[in-house]
Image: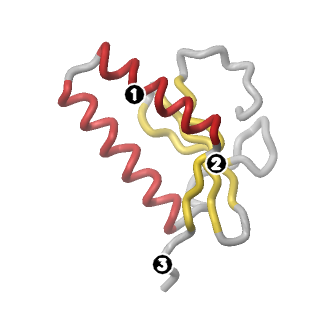
């Protein structure tokens, strides 16, 4: 069985992760923050093992969308031996972005 695809985060996705984490630290409880982190870790693990599990975006070819929870989606693309996370999108942002 395949051990999983290597997960790579783009600079944009890292910046969005940092922004999301800062927002959550300021507005959510520690328990909610830990639950979000667990959901994110679980989703990334699923993507690593089964990258085609989540559907392709309706708006951007070769980009897949994984719902972390109702407030955040993870957008990624599958490469030959890796998965590139291109965005951790907060659904409260303007939906007219390049990864949707």
* Secondary element at image label 2: strand
Report the residue marked by disc 1.
21
Which callout, 2 or 1, points at the residue further toward the start of the chain? 1
Residue 63 image position (x, y, % from top left)? 72, 47
Q: Is residue 82 left or right of residue 29?
A: right
Q: Looking at the rendering, which quadrant does residue 7 occupy?
A: bottom right
Q: Please report the residue visible at 42 percent of the width from the left and 34 percent of the height from the top.
A: 69
Label 3 and label 2: CA atoms lie apart by: 19 Å
Which callout, 3 or 1, points at the residue further toward the start of the chain? 3
Pointer 1: residues within 10 angstroms few (<14), some, or many (20+)?
Answer: some
11 and 56: which is toward the camera: 11
Q: Is residue 24 left or right of residue 89?
A: left
Residue 31 image position (x, y, % from top left)? 18, 30
Pointer 3: residues within 10 angstroms few (<14), some, or many (20+)?
Answer: few
Rendered view: 65 above or below 83: above
Which callout, 3 or 2, points at the residue further toward the start of the chain? 3
Please identify, in this view, whether the residue under mark 2 or under mark 1 is nearer the observer.
1
Do the numbered discs 3 and 2 sit on residues whose CB atoms are within 8 Å?
no
Total marks drawn? 3
Please identify, in this view, whether the residue under mark 3 or under mark 1 is nearer the observer.
1
Residue 5 image position (x, y, % from top left)? 56, 69
* Secondary element at image label 3: loop
Pointer 2: residues within 10 angstroms few (<14), some, or many (20+)?
Answer: many
Do the numbered discs 3 and 1 sit on residues whose CB atoms are within 8 Å?
no
Q: Please report the residue visible at 53 percent of the width from the left and 24 percent of the height from the top.
A: 90
Residue 41 numbered tag: none
Residue 64 image position (x, y, % from top left)? 66, 48
Q: Please report the residue visible at 58 percent of the width from the left and 48 percent of the height from the top.
A: 9
Report the residue marked by disc 2.
76
Q: Quadrant of the C terminus?
A: top right
Label 3 and label 1: CA atoms lie apart by: 29 Å
Report the residue marked by disc 3.
3
């Amino acid at each position: 069985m395949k051990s999983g695809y290597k997960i790579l985060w783009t600079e944009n996705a890292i910046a969005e992760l940092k922004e999301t984490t800062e927002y959550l630290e300021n507005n959510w409880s520690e328990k909610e923050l830990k639950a979000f982190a667990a959901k994110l870790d679980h989703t990334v693990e699923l993507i690593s093992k089964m990258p085609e599990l989540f559907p392709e975006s309706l708006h951007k070819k070769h980009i897949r969308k994984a719902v972390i929870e109702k407030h955040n989606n993870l957008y990624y693309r599958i490469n030959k031996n890796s998965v590139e996370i291109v965005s951790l999108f907060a659904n409260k942002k303007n939906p007219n972005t390049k990864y949707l």
